[in-house]
Amino acid sequence: MTTSSRPRISGTQFINADQAPRARLSLSASHRDQHHPVTGTGGDPRFGAIDTPANESCVVCAPATRRLAEELFEGWNAALQTGDARKVAARYAEDAVLLPTVSNVPRTTHAEIQDYFEHFLEKKPFGTINTRNVKLGCNKLTDAGTYTFRVTDGGETKDVPARYTFVYENRDGGWKIVHHHSSMMPTA
């Protein structure tokens, strides 16, 4: 075996308290191709980081799974059931963007997101996922598909089919919604 002057590659790490720190390598650390680029830092300070800015450390990724996407939606839907717009808005990051179902106004501040839910919650919404497509990334999870909301409007209960996209990011150890788009299904 020859010794190379090339920098050592350290893989992206997953947070898992049950494993020793050295055993926390991600799948992408061992399966590199055009869809799994090299990440991490170089072991030799002469070369610096391979694909991260100088003085960056190896990225630590929180586990993201389809089940996590389901749990995050269930938590958001449970927050709707409280009727408290503050609890719903708390599930969104401070810099989140909400493109809501029943408003033409994009909500780009926490106060605007809370304001939207103060009005939307009057309809007593309950969401049910119909179809789901989940994409997983490092500290990011995208859940897109279709859902149906059962709402009460003017004393009448009706089902409203809609499309959705939730983008979640793991920030400071917790998952927050950073982007949420919801639109009613077209009639044609």
Image: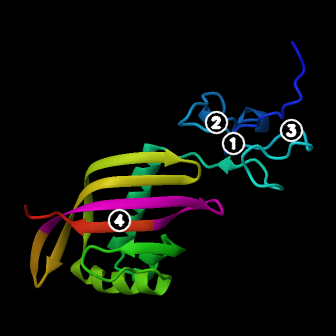
- Which labelled disc corresponds to residue 39? 1
User: Between tags 1 and 4, which lies in front?
Assistant: 1
What amino acid type is highlighted by mark number 1?
A: Thr
Contact between marks 3 and 4 (CB within 8 A): the answer is no
Check disc 3 and report its element: helix, strand or loop: loop
SS class of the residue under badge 4?
Answer: helix
| Tag nearer the camera, 3 or 4 | 3
Left or right relative to 81: residue 15 = right
Give the Cα separation between the discs numbered 4 and 2.
Answer: 31 Å
Q: Residues within 10 Å of mark 4 (few under 14, many from 20)?
A: some
Which residue is depicted at the point 25% across and 60% down?
A: 163
User: For residue 142: magenta?
Assistant: no
Give residue 77's mark. Answer: 4
* Residue identifier under label 2: 26
Q: Which range of residues does the magenta coloring cover?
A: 159-178
Spot occupied by residue 187 in the image (x, y as percentages of width and height):
8, 64
Q: Which residue is mark 3?
A: 43
Image coordinates of residue 86 in percent, x first then y, are 45, 81
Q: Position of residue 41 (x, y in %)?
A: 79, 44
| Mark earlier in primary sequence (2, 1) | 2
Q: In the rendered view, would you say 26 is above or below 173?
A: above
